[in-house]
Image (cartoon, helix red, strand yellow):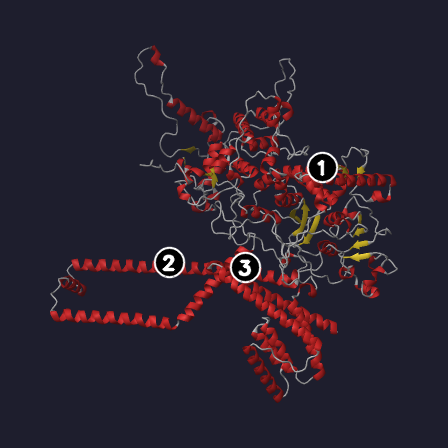
């Protein structure tokens, strides 16, 4: 059986310092080279692993056999190429001839020191569960530390402890209390589009009823469906834009490739020119260069250019005038249009200023924090699910989400998202090559 | 030369601070900082120019007022947070060394106030600081209640410990008890999201939303740490509010809580309210939740009566000094709510001012004479709460719905109303007839009905409460198609169409007159029968003059109406021509034959028109005085108002037509 050995180099640790001189008594025992002894021992060890004992100690019968007649099976054997095992399999299948030490518990010594062992009291024992919790606490994820007890006094009627102290002990110096800044009393930034504060619990319209009036429900359904259609349109438009972008990218890539190919071709052509094969292109290029030298214009030419420019200018002017005339004809129409626009804008303004509450669906563009606000759930019961009975009502929307979103919309805190996993450093997985460090001999 | 100003020493750079800077300044971890900000009510701000505040800027940078953060430095909670941080460091150090037992010891000692003498912190002072007066706290109660009622109905998870849920539930039930005792619940609305309630406490309208039972899904994108922080604060706050409210109605806080009953699902019934009045015998508990006392023990009943009497006396004695001195005390204001002033316009013809509700009918008496039984399939908690809050003393329910009922026996003869939400079995319907007979049916068993009581669907309770009167139970009988459940929170504007009001209550004078004239015309048409088309035209013309219908519709009407012979048509055209001319010249058209009644009406109508025209002229004149900007604004307002009012007009017209048809049939 083969024993693994490194393919090259010294498999041993770094060699000892070679000391050629053995002068002096101290130096005799220092840095003695024992590699040949170790080698011998290793060989011996290998022999034991392979054969079970030292070869020298084995009986001759075990080592040798006299072959009187040839092996009859040898012709039946398959060629070596077919029976050859994988090296890896061979390595894995290899077993030492020395039997393994049994793992069974062996009885200890029968003799003792006469002192009976005391059973250890594990008062300080911490359970695994507790340990996990402690680790969490150490990581800052402790449970709430606020104690909420039953109120036993009226906070709004409670006497000021500071005042009491000053009344009882008037000689003590007054402690200045920190003044509450005005900024603390300012309302948080509402995220609604019109900037008005959003109520904590918006008043529900009739459309939210479990058994709504027809008109209310229709209005709400229309509103919601318009919203959804709008969103879907937006999504489709985005998809389309993405597709167009990809097509354009592919096209430009193809163009670039073609240009590259052309360049390659022309290089080759140039090369051929070097070799003395003149192509027609060369002449053209030479002609272009020679044309750059401008000739003096004659007066006739100058006049001609002047006339052309004048004509161009006139044409342009006339086009502009024509456009103006057309607009003049439509002036009343345009004025009407502008007026209507202004009117619509003002109506919108008034309507906006009309309702005193902020809307929590139409939000302003700039928001607080890193993440966008979560979208509101569609809170509507579809027409086919609309039931008159309270028992069969399927509640819609998620109040938890609603509450959380409401906090964010009212600007009480910056928007957050639950991050279920900590972001970890990206690792790259590769195969280890250490098996190449070993060869079989 | 003035002193040169250095950059970053004044203005936005000085007034604002980024979150990272703030965290560094306070020496806290980010989660702790967030917590502190939530408790103390410090919100992110937005500088006008972000670039002026800091050089390193991302779109997501959050800013705070520097003054706010500076003020946070004085917060006693900050020291607690730092202590916690020290503890964390100690524990992690010990764990790192492998001294697990040491770590456990540190932790247990820090969290054991008896051993260390150091109490864990409470948020009492924060409540006082954020809400200097009780009314401030009431104004912020919407959010608090919605949150706590929501958390009370959540299933317990690692993020939401069971302890917190139990606490929320208890606080909410206590608050409901106050509403029941003080009868301050006003409205309620069954929406698809949950049940809205509105109460009026000391003049403040409080609206909150309670989820339906067993409905809460916990979705991924909610930060429970943040929600938990809010809930911690709100629990403290509601505790104090409850204390104040309970003491204001002469009750002891906290009320006695029966753990055993609570485990059996008694909910509201698990609490026993006690009065704090010294004069009454201290052992008498005011058994508000259990109407059983009415029936079972006359002795307790007497005691209860005594308490009520005394309370009333107290109220009277309290009110007397309130008249003399300015009512600064909120408690007195609370008791004074019975007599609310009526708002009356100063000048005649002024705007109609919104009146405080419940000045006439008493919410405490709405259901007071009833004994209600809730069937198995009805939502018990909201029904029990609402019925009790509106005066119902005896509520029984099926044993499945939990403990604390007046009776679990459906056959109890004292039951006057039963709330059912079960589909009616068809066979039974045939026997019962219209379902109206269920009050008079004399046998039990068909649909399980008992004689002598009224069966209604749950919506009856809600609609009765919202309309402040008992709705007729026939409309809400089991199996009947229910009327729509309208939102009581939609404020109807002046002159807008309101489907709940009768037509007479909302139509304008001119409209009513128009309708009468039309009726009279119809009558006369039937008499002479010949010139239907002409008269019809006449009407249309008049309506048009008053600014009623759009042109297109009219033409359609004309098209429908004109089916007479050719010469009739020709006469109609002629008539129309005459009218048009008359209108241009400003004269009134002379109708051919009119009876004196109609004439009087027409006269009245003319006067109204004249008045309207005069008013319009006045307005026009007044408009001339306004600045250009204001005038434009005014015109726009008029435009939108007109648009709305024409819509309402159409709706009313439609309804009138329907009603007329109904009357005929």
Quadrant of residue B650 within the rendered picture: bottom right
Q: Contact (CB < 8 A) between labels 1 and 3?
A: no
Badge 1 sits on which subunit? Answer: B
On the image, the x and y values in percent for residue B530 come to 67, 85
Label 3 marks which chain's residue? A
Residue B602 in which image quadrant: bottom right
Which structural element holds mark 1? helix
Instruction: Return the residue at label 3.
Output: A227
Using the numbered discs, state the Cα–Cα distance from disc 1 to disc 3 in whole angstroms: 49 Å
Look at the numbered discs 2 and 3 and tell me whether their residues touch, using CB distance below 8 Å.
Answer: no
Q: Residues within 10 Å of mark 1 (few under 14, many from 20)?
A: some
Give me the disc on residue B247: 1
- Earlier in the chain: of badge 2 and badge 3, it is 3
Residue B424 % position (x, y): 78, 61
Tag in front: 2 or 3: 3
Which residue has dot 2 on it?
A249
Residue A40 rendering spot, x and y as whole percentages:
41, 24
Foreground of the two, A352 or B510 = B510
List the single residue furthest toward the top.
A25
Q: How far apart are marks 2 and 1 (CA)?
A: 75 Å
Q: How crowded is mark 3: few (under 14 residues within 10 Å), some or many (20 or more)?
A: few
The percent coordinates of residue B441 (x first, y second) are 86, 61
Task: Give the alpha-carbon distance from disc 2 to disc 3, as whole Å.
Answer: 33 Å
Q: Which chain carries label 2?
A: A
């Amino acid at each position: 059986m083969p024993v693994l050995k490194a393919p090259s180099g010294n498999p041993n640790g770094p060699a000892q310092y070679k000391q050629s001189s053995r002068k002096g008594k101290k130096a005799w025992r220092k840095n003695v080279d024992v590699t040949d002894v170790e080698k011998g021992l290793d060989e011996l060890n290998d022999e034991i692993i392979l054969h079970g004992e030292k070869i020298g100690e084995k009986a001759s019968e075990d080592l040798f056999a006299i072959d009187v007649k040839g092996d009859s099976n040898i012709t039946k054997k398959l060629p070596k190429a077919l029976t050859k095992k994988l090296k890896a399999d061979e390595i894995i299948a290899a077993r030492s001839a020395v039997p393994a030490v049994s793992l069974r518990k062996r009885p200890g010594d029968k003799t003792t020191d006469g002192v009976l062992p005391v059973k250890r009291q594990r008062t300080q024992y911490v359970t695994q569960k507790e340990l996990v919790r402690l680790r969490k606490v150490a990581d800052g994820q402790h449970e709430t530390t606020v104690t909420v007890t039953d109120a036993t006094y009226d906070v709004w009627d409670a006497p000021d402890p500071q005042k009491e102290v000053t009344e009882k002990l008037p000689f003590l110096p007054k402690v200045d209390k920190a003044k509450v800044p005005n900024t603390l009393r300012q309302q948080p930034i509402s995220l609604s589009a019109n900037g008005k504060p959003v109520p904590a619990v918006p008043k529900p319209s009739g459309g939210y009823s479990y058994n709504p009036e027809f008109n209310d429900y229709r209005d709400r359904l229309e509103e919601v469906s318009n919203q959804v259609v709008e969103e879907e349109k937006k999504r489709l438009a985005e998809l389309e834009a993405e597709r167009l972008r990809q097509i354009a990218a592919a096209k430009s890539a193809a163009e670039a490739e073609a240009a590259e190919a052309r360049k390659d071709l022309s290089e080759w052509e140039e090369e051929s020119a070097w070799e003395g094969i003149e192509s027609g292109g060369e002449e053209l290029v030479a002609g272009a260069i020679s044309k750059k030298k401008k000739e003096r214009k004659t007066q006739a030419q100058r006049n001609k250019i002047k006339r052309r420019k004048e004509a161009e200018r006139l044409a342009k002017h006339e086009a502009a005038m024509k456009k103006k005339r057309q607009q003049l004809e439509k002036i009343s129409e345009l004025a009407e249009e502008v007026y209507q626009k202004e009117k619509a804008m003002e109506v919108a303004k008034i309507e906006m200023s009309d309702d005193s509450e902020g809307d929590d669906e139409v939000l302003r563009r700039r928001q607080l924090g890193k993440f966008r606000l979560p979208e509101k759930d569609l809170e509507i019961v579809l027409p086919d699910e609309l039931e008159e009975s309270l028992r069969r009502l399927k509640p819609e929307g998620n109040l938890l989400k609603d509450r959380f979103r409401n906090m964010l919309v009212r600007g009480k805190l910056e928007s957050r998202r639950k991050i279920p996993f900590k972001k970890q450093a990206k690792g790259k997985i590769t195969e280890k090559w250490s098996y190449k460090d070993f060869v079989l001999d | 030369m003035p002193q040169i100003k250095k950059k970053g020493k004044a203005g936005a750079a000085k007034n604002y601070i980024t979150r990272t800077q703030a965290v560094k300044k306070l020496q806290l971890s980010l989660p702790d900082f967030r917590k502190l900000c939530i408790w103390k009510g410090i919100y992110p701000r937005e500088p006008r120019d972000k670039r002026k505040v800091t050089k390193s800027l991302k779109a997501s940078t959050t800013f705070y007022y520097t003054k706010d953060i500076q003020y946070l430095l004085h917060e006693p909670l900050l020291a607690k947070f730092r202590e916690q941080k020290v503890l964390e460091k100690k524990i992690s150090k010990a764990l790192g060394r492998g001294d697990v037992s040491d770590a456990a010891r540190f932790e247990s000692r820090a969290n054991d106030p008896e051993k260390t003498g150091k109490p864990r912190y409470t948020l009492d002072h924060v409540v006082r600081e954020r809400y200097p007066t009780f009314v401030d706290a009431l104004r912020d109660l919407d959010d608090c209640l919605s949150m706590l009622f929501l958390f009370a109905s959540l299933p317990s998870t690692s993020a939401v410990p069971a302890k917190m849920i139990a606490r929320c539930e208890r606080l909410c039930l206590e608050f409901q008890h106050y509403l029941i005792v003080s009868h301050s619940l006003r409205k309620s609305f069954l929406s698809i999201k949950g049940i809205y309630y509105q109460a009026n406490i000391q003049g403040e309208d409080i609206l909150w939303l309670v989820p339906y039972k067993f409905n809460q899904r916990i979705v991924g994108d909610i930060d429970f740490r943040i929600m938990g922080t809010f809930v911690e604060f709100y629990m403290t706050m509601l505790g104090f509010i409850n204390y104040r409210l309970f003491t204001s109605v002469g009750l002891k806080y906290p009320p006695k809580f029966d753990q055993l009953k609570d485990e059996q699902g008694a909910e509201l019934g698990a609490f026993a309210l006690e009065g704090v009045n010294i004069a009454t015998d201290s052992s008498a508990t005011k058994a508000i939740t259990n109407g059983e006392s009415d029936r079972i023990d006359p002795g307790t009943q007497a005691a209860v009566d005594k308490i009520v009497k005394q309370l009333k006396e107290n109220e009277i004695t309290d009110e007397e000094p309130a008249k003399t001195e300015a009512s600064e005390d909120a408690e007195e204001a609370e008791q004074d709510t019975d007599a609310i002033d009526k708002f009356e316009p100063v000048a005649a013809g002024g705007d109609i001012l919104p009146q405080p509700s419940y000045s006439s009918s008493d919410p405490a008496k709405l259901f007071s004479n009833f004994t209600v039984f809730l069937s198995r399939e009805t939502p018990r908690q909201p029904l029990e709460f609402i019925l009790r809050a509106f005066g119902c003393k005896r509520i029984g329910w099926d044993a499945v719905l939990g403990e604390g009922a007046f009776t679990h026996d459906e056959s109890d003869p004292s039951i006057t109303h039963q709330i059912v939400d079960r589909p009616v079995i068809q066979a039974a319907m045939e026997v019962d007839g219209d379902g109206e007979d269920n009050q008079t049916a004399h046998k039990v068993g068909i649909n399980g009905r008992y004689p002598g009581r009224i069966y209604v669907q749950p919506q009856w309770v809600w609609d009765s409460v919202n309309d402040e009167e008992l709705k007729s139970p026939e409309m809400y009988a089991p199996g009947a198609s229910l009327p729509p459940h309208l939102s009581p929170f939609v404020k109807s504007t002046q002159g807008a169409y309101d489907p709940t009001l009768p037509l007479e209550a909302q139509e304008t004078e001119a409209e009513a007159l128009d309708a009468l004239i039309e009726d009279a015309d119809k009558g006369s048409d039937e008499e002479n029968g010949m010139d239907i088309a002409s008269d019809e035209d006449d009407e249309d013309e008049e309506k048009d003059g008053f600014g009623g219908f759009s042109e297109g519709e009219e033409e359609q009407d004309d098209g429908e109406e004109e089916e007479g012979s050719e010469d009739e048509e020709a006469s109609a055209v002629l008539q129309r021509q005459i009218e048009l001319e008359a209108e241009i010249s400003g004269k009134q058209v002379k109708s051919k034959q009119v009876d004196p009644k109609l004439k009087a009406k027409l006269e009245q109508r003319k006067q109204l028109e004249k008045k309207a025209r005069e008013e319009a002229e006045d307005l026009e004149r007044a408009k001339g005085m306004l600045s250009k900007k204001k005038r434009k604004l005014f015109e726009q307002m008029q435009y939108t108002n007109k648009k709305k009012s024409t819509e309402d007009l159409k709706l009313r017209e439609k309804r009138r037509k329907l009603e007329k048809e109904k009357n005929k049939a």
